[in-house]
Image (tube, coloured by chain):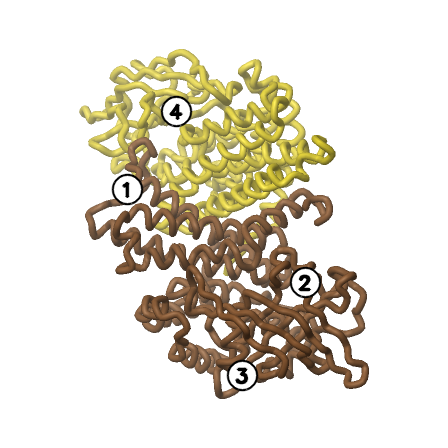
Chain colours: A brown, B yellow
Amino acid sequence: MISFEKSKAVDQMETVVQTVAENMMRPVTRHLDENEGEIPWDYISFMHTALKQMGAASLVPEPEGNGASEKGEKKEKRASQSYQLMAHSIEWLSWGDAGMYLCTPRGGLGSAAVEASGTPEQKKKFLARLNGDKPVLTAMAITEAQAGSDNSAIQCRAVLDEKTKEWVLNGEKIFITAGLKAFEDTDGFIVVWATLDPEAGRAGIRSFVVEAGTPGAIITKKEHKLGIRVSDTVTLTLEDCRVPYENMLGSPEIEKSTKGFKGAMQTFNVTRPLVAASGLGVARAALEELKSMLEERGVEIRYGLPRQKLTNIEREIIDMERMLRSSWLLTIKAVWMSDNKKPNAKEAAMSKLHAGDVVTKITQRAVEIMGPLGFSREFLLEKWFRDAKINDIYEGTGQINRLIAARQILGYSGKELR
Amino acid sequence: MYGFEPNEEQQMLIDVVRRYAEKDMRDAHRDAEEEGEVPKALIEKGWELGILQASVPADYGGFGERSAVTSVLAAEELAFGDLAIALAVMAPGLFALPILLVGSEEQKKNYLPGIVEGEWQPCTAALIEYEFDFDANELSTTAKEEGDEYVLSGEKRYVPYAADAEAMIIYANLDGVTQGFIVEKSTDGLTVGERDMTLGVHALPLYGLHLDNVRVPKANRLGGAEGHDFIHILNSMRVANAALSVGLARASYEYANEYAKDREVLGSMIAQKQSIAFMIAENGTEIEANRLLTWEAAWQLDEGIEEVDKSAYLAEVGAADMVMQVTDSGVQILGGHGYIREHPVELWMRNGRSMAMLTGLAMV
């Protein structure tokens, strides 16, 4: 069936999240941007309590069929809406403040990785802490100085100490989103990607849960960024960092295959549309503000006219609205596919590359159209312009996502289209 | 709940229309373009797919109910085959659908069975006027009330099959609003002019129309004495235009993709080069994005959601941009070969440019 009707669940969720975005995020958004390093504890604590009451284990729903819990089998009968709900919430939270959204507790990429590739025992062990009295964040450490989009080139080593049955991790991980909040500010964990054998490429790569306070793991750098400043981005240095054997995600039996790596890459099919949703929240914020600023200044936007009769500003706004809406529909379709367990590597990449373009263009044009007002820190347009850009970079740059989409369209392997 | 998959019935329709598009239309489209005519048998075969007939309820001779979503799915497939032939097959809808949507009970009973029960016939509509800033909501052709009649005067262009049409709907400006009037063949004052010479859709016969005090009975005003709200017709035209753009873009896109995978330059296929692969990724994304915009607008049409006035407009202008970009890429990817009429991409590029000005030549 083809339908664009929001479900009741989505409607209700949006009402709640809108309230949070309007009342808890917007009033502090400028202050937090100007005071890098300040932690929005009010928001974090509120979201922790609220999500706990809703019974949501984390913002990331459990992918069914993976690890085959009894719960998963029951859910099988009715198509889930989890990712659709998440996309709508993330869009609204990012409309409030994209950096603050990244500080949302009980979730983050770390728990997503555990959900996606952990065994039932690992899920139980590591996700339990999300449900405690105090808020907890988690993070994921993939990128290294020499391994960004090419994450099969990572050099961080994991060696098994046969005597103690511990994994010994060595290396340096950069650009970890919310790493500080996961590792020092709360009692969370960081999922670290490391290789068992640098010669083995993808086949050697595994992910390991490094819990807050583990000796040998130290946050060594805090980045200062263009935007999303309230969300910390850090470097994690691992020096003979020992983690228990069972902290390696997934089953140890699959060693010497690329299944582990592929599993990890598949989580991108889930997370890319969610990043798109976040970007589109920023884009909507900027477009709404731009339209209201223009309206206050007596500029009317006339819809339905032939283009030859429109002013340049009208053409721009109409174009932005069209881009934003079509990008949102790409995103909703991609998460709908996740919910309905349809393979969506192509759609996920498309939603992400499109949203990355759209949020970048809309925020850039919004600043330009408002001229000196757009450039001023008195308004939020310049902030959204800065916040926007990350959406065309993280979770795969626009270019990597073009490569992935093109491979899917043309039926090429990674080797055939580099 | 959201849904992004055609239902079983819609899928069956897509499949039969696609077979017609891939086989019958593609076999004939180049000759049709060069000769400036769509063979009658080909139109008849397309008509027999029953797309319009399925939009009209049994009370008026059809066998279904109008669904803009279903029609949009069919329109995309038709345009994937060929735009001119698609417009030819869909032409009777230009006359029947406005009557179905906003016509009076009497008009529906009088006209609809005659169209949907028989063979394809050249019924049509006249909307477009020859001005650079043509605006369907501010027509130069006027309608004046005189006694029991309306008197129409003005000039129309790009009227499909005007020379052969038994009846047509003529849109005119009545006290500042656009209204449609049912006008029968050989009404006094109605003259069909020269065939229009255009950049694209050469196979589709388009004509100019001269209206010199054309008198039509009041009962022929679309919707009866009270008339109608033209926006419902315009929305349907916009959504149809967007769907055709998506289908046309897909034709060029798929053709160029296959070519790129088969064309070797400097040691690899051109599809394996990022400059081409990125173009393909972007075009594929834009086609899908605009398809979803079109579907959403069509769904809003079916659900009677007011937002459609804006959505249909955004879908129309968005798809017009998209189809130009994608069909241009099609020629660019084929390079010099794309410029030669042996390949269809140049035809699709010319038709691609037409979408921005041909709203009013199809409805869903």
Q: Which residue is mark 4?
A: B168
Q: Which residue is mark 1?
A: A302
Check if mark 3's residue and mark 2's residue have beta carbons within 8 Å. no
Report x, y in % for residue B148.
Answer: 22, 26
Identify residue type, mark 4: Met
Residue B209: quadrant of the picture: top left
For image coordinates 69% across by 75% down, the residue present is A169
Badge 3 sits on which subunit? A
**Do callouts 4 and 3 point to residues on the same chain?**
no
Q: Which residue is mark 3?
A: A187
Identify residue type, mark 1: Arg
Whichever of callouts 1 and 3 sits on the residue coming sooner in the sequence is 3
Nearer mark to the viewer, of 4 and 3? 3
Q: Which residue is mark 2?
A: A154
Check if mark 2's residue and mark 4's residue have beta carbons within 8 Å. no
Query: Alpha-carbon distance for marks 2 and 4?
Result: 69 Å
Nearer mark to the viewer, of 2 and 4? 2
**Do callouts 2 and 1 point to residues on the same chain?**
yes
Give the answer, above or below, for where A202 lies relative to B148.
below
Query: Alpha-carbon distance for marks 4 and 3?
Result: 74 Å
